[in-house]
Image (spheres, rainbow, N blue to C red):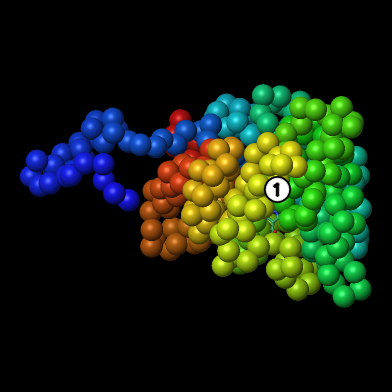
Amino acid sequence: MTTPFPQSFPATRLRRLRQAPWIRGLTAENVLTPSDLIWSMVVHDGNTPRIPVEAMPGVERFNVTEAAEAAKRAKALGIPAIAIFPHIDPRFKDEEGSEGLNPDGLIPSCIKAMKDAAPEVGIICDVALDPFTTHGHDGLIDEAGYVLNDETTSILVEQALVQANAGADVVAPSDMMDGRIGAIREALEGEGHTNTLILSYAAKYASGFYGPYREAIGSATALIGDKKTYQQNPANSDESLREVAMDIAEGADMVMIKPGLPYLDIVRRVSETFAIPTLAFQVSGEYAMIQAAAQNGWIDGDRVMMETLLSFKRAGASGVVTYFAEKAAQKLG
Ligand code: PBG
């Protein structure tokens, strides 16, 4: 970057601007508020109110009642939206992920309970089959284990409609099938859901940082192989621009970059190139690393939490999906 004017010492002493809290605050270029946070929440279909997730200290799976209570807390804290992810009883899983289409299933029940409890809070639903399939993939597989694109898309369309019918404000396809945004948009329009937002996980990488999430939703033992034939290669950056351009053309209202911190360069490129609301997902592994180091006394966990969340804003994100949402909003409050 070339500076617009010469800066020479001692006429310029940049430390003058850092000498006290009032001047640091006055000149801060970015600010984090609770309205930047989307609460990433794992829900389950059992009766136990809260079940701790071992690989994610501080995160608990909520049953439907607890999820509704959490929605009220989100409202009180000024958290605008909650993204829910289901942990499904293995009894309900099959090869096709049929439970994802059950209008009386866990996710529709949560949507209704949460919207009843706190209608002001936006509910975002993951569109993907992995929580519901015995093989742990996001779509249908053929005999060779390859995830089928177009066949999967037809099911995702049904899943998105089930969520929209239950009252979801946002459907968020995280599966990385080609063409699913256009197909979902067309179906939503066709069913009169003209105001249902689509948040596309447009740039989603095949990442090791999702490890703890698979324990959280109970797909860890299930997953056969990896997701590299549909999620992006971490070596690529231009490819994300192509993904985002397609999803916008197909009808996405917002796009997501995932994982978060290791991909801030993508957040920056996408937000600058497309000027569309760009969200970042601070995923389970990022959360777990911070919590593990903090528990060992190696870092100040709260400080690192706030620093990472602010970094997303600095990179150009409009908001951050994070397991820290409640804690961070309490601190900000
Ligand atoms: C899959 C999905 C994943 C996450 C959200 N939706 C995992 C994956 O793609 O394997 C990860 C979230 C996290 O790690 O916090 N549809």
Q: Which residue is mark 1?
A: 246
The quadrant holding residue 24 is: top left
Whether residue 215 is visible: no
In the rendered image, residue 300, in percent from the top left (x then y), is placed at 38, 54
Q: Name the residue located 66 percent from the left edge and 47 percent from the top edge.
A: 245
In the rendered image, residue 1, in percent from the top left (x then y), is placed at 32, 51
Q: Is residue 332 left or right of residue 2?
A: right
Whether residue 315 is visible: yes
In the rendered image, residue 80, in percent from the top left (x then y), is placed at 60, 31
Depth check, front residue: 114 or 51: 114
Depth check, front residue: 181 or 73: 181
Where is 105 relative to 153, above or below?
A: above
The quadrant holding residue 22 is: top left
In the rendered image, residue 157, in percent from the top left (x then y), is placed at 86, 45
The mark tally for this picture is: 1
Depth check, front residue: 179 or 282: 179
> Which residue is most to the left?
10
Q: Name the residue located 45 percent from the left edge and 62 percent from the top edge.
A: 293
Q: Name the residue located 87 percent from the left edge and 56 percent from the top edge.
A: 150
